[in-house]
Image: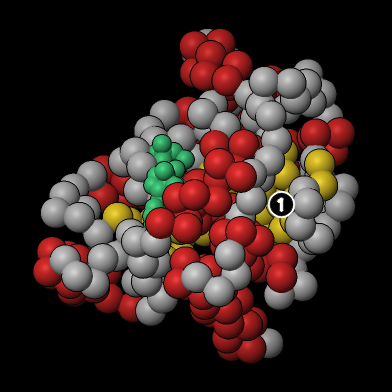
């Protein structure tokens, strides 16, 4: 595949439960609905992106663990989802042992990058769902990506840990991948009835300025119900505020890219 037109985005934040997987599933679905061909790589041993799209991670054999080990071809692991234009490389809990298994392996940070280069279908976007840590799997995702998308839960400790994440980005830029850049920060679980939400959102915007997306994802119970039905929110309830927000985020990201392309052409 020529990767030149594929936008590879790592969705990462070492903080747990901030909306990484929810963002991957729903942003990818909204992009697919905009006629973009999208691949999700589930690089979290928890496998929430796989189950959230209706795949039983216990029975999937051709999964990401075997891809990153180099046991199977990445092309054989790509499967169609129930959403047109949306594909996934699912994972299994076995992936958790990769950190120990690869400990003495040379170039272990480059495994995912070299596998992605072998993908023979062209995709507009590849979204990588990272686990809640800055370990080897997140490092692989950052080395393989051009962009980092950070979901940030609007809560009191929101900014805590972001310095560490940015230090890791700089380490990756210096040592492996100077193309990596912070694409944007998306505020998640925003609760307009809660004063803290407003305060934290304004703090984050002061700090990260135009890197913060205009679209804010509201706290919405439908978003948390959808995964138990194995569906993205846009399939579960297209009219709810969560669906509207993810559709708007997809539009913002696609437009951001169109503007960049216009500038460069
Ligand atoms: N906007 C939202 N409104 C309500 N619930 C949400 C929202 N976003 C995420 N959730 C719920 O919060 C929980 C954590 O979300 P999610 O799994 O996306 O976070 P994560 O960052 O991927 O977690 P982990 O770090 O464990 O991988 C899930 O139960 C999810 O359904
Ligand atoms: Mg997750």
Instruction: Please tell me which residue lies in front, 248 or 259.
Output: 248
- Figure quadrant of residue 189: bottom left
- Please state the horizontal and vertical placement of residue 176, each as a whole percent of the image: 51, 42
Given residues 158 and 173, the one toward you in this image is 158
User: Residue 19: horizontal and vertical position, in percent?
Assistant: 41, 50
61 left or right of 102 in image = right
The structure's colour scheme is secondary structure
Which residue is disc 1 drawn over? Answer: 39
Using residue 254 as the reference point, say whether residue 177 is left or right of it: left
Total tally of numbered discs in the picture: 1
Can see residue 3? no
Q: Residue at x 82, y 47 (%)?
A: 80
Quadrant location of the C terminus in the rendered image: bottom right
Q: Which residue lies at the image location 81% right of the left edge and 41% below the top edge?
A: 79
The x, y position of residue 82, in whole percent, is 78, 51
Instruction: Examine the image and state in which quarter residue 62 appears.
Output: top right
Kind of element beneath mark 1: strand
Q: Is residue 181 left or right of residue 72?
A: left
Near mark 1 (Cα within 10 A), the count class, few <14, some 14-19 or many ≥20, is: many
Splitting the image into 4 quarters, where does residue 188 fall?
A: bottom left
Q: Considering only vertical position in the picture, is 111 above or below 88?
A: above
Q: Image point 72% across, 65% down: which residue?
A: 32
Q: Position of residue 155 (x, y in %)?
A: 20, 55
In the rendered image of this protein, does residue 144 appear above or below residue 146? Answer: above
Whether residue 191 is visible to the viewer of this picture, yes or no, is yes
Residue placed at 45% from the left, 50% from the top? 224
């Amino acid at each position: 595949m020529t990767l030149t037109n594929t936008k590879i985005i790592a969705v990462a934040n070492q903080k747990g439960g901030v909306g990484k997987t929810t963002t991957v599933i729903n942003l990818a679905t909204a992009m697919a609905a905009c006629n973009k061909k999208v691949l999700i790589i589930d690089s979290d041993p928890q496998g929430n992106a796989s189950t959230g799209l209706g795949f039983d991670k216990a029975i999937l054999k051709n999964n990401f663990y075997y891809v990153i080990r180099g046991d199977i071809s990445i092309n054989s692991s790509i499967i169609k989802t129930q959403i047109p234009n949306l594909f996934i490389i699912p994972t299994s809990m076995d992936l958790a042992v990769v950190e120990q298994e690869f400990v003495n392996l040379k170039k272990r940070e480059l495994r995912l990058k070299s596998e992605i280069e072998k993908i023979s279908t062209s995709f507009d976007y590849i979204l990588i769902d990272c686990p809640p840590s800055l370990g080897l799997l997140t490092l692989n995702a950052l080395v393989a990506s051009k962009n980092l998308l950070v979901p940030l839960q609007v809560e009191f400790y929101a900014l805590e840990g972001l310095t560490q994440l940015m230090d890791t980005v700089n380490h990756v830029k210096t040592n492996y991948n100077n193309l990596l850049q912070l694409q944007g920060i998306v505020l998640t679980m925003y609760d307009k009835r809660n004063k803290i939400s407003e305060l934290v959102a304004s703090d984050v915007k002061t700090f990260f300025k135009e890197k913060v997306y205009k679209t804010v994802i509201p706290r919405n119970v439908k978003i948390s119900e959808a995964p138990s039905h194995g569906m993205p929110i846009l399939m579960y309830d297209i009219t709810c505020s969560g669906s509207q927000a993810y559709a708007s985020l997809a539009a913002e990201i696609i437009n951001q890219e169109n503007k960049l392309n216009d500038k460069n052409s």
